């Protein structure tokens, strides 16, 4: 079974190697939370759920894992561009990354998170699911 850390490496690899994401966030892609005083814009990813496929004879051969990507920026248009780049990098991806066999990543939905007037930042949240083939 892939651990959250292994899945994080997959997400980081796909995002950091995408020119659209890199042009905006460079390598500012973090699990769960960004370090204090991180330069904007940046991306945070969180794995939210793992659902195994049920079988009668053993360990699940396929997990469906939900994860969320949050994009942060000081400019609304830049934040929207970053969210679009993240979606383009991940939606319908299939292949092997960091030794993990990905059947498909699927974009599930998106929403404007909020504008924090005190910090003057915009936030946009994107939800994905990944079908991950497991070794038995």
Image (cartoon, rainbow, N blue to C red):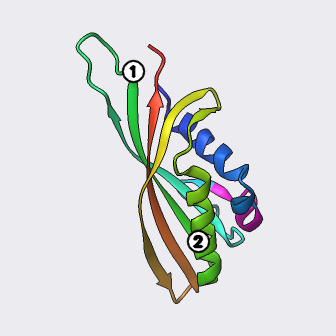
Q: What SS does tag 1 mark?
A: loop
| Left or right relative to 14: residue 27 | right
- Location of residue 64 in the rendering, given as x and y in whole percent from the top left corner: 38, 37
Query: What is the distance, in whole Å, between disc 2 and disc 1 at their CAs?
Result: 35 Å
Q: Is residue 44 above or below residue 90?
A: below
Question: Local crowd at mark 2 within 10 Å, few (<14), some, or many (≥20)?
Answer: many
| Left or right relative to 45: residue 62 | left
Residue picked out by circle 1: 61
Q: Is residue 108 above or below residue 81?
A: above
The residue at the point 62 percent across, 26 percent down is 99
Give the residue at the far bottom of this rendering.
117
- Location of residue 51 in the rendering, given as x and y in whole percent from the top left corner: 32, 36
| Left or right relative to 75: residue 60 | left
Query: In the rendering, which numbered label is found on residue 72?
Result: 2
Q: Decide whether residue 24 is among the magenta residues.
A: yes
Query: In the rendering, which numbered label is found on residue 104?
Result: none
Do the residues under discs 2 and 1 have CB atoms within 8 angstroms?
no
The residue at the point 67 percent across, 71 percent down is 41
């Amino acid at each position: 079974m892939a651990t959250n850390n292994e899945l994080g490496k997959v997400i980081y690899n796909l995002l950091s190697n995408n020119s659209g994401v890199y042009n905006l966030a460079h390598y500012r892609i973090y699990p769960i939370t960004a370090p204090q005083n991180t330069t904007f814009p940046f991306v945070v990813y969180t794995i939210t759920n793992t659902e195994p496929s049920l079988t009668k004879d053993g360990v699940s051969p396929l997990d469906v894992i939900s994860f969320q990507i949050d994009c942060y920026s000081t400019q609304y248009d830049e934040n929207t561009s970053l969210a679009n780049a993240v979606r383009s990098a991940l939606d319908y991806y299939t292949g092997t990354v960091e030794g993990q066999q990905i059947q498909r990543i699927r974009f599930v939905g998106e929403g404007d998170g909020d504008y924090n007037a005190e910090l003057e930042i915009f936030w946009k949240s994107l939800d994905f699911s990944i079908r991950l083939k497991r070794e038995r």
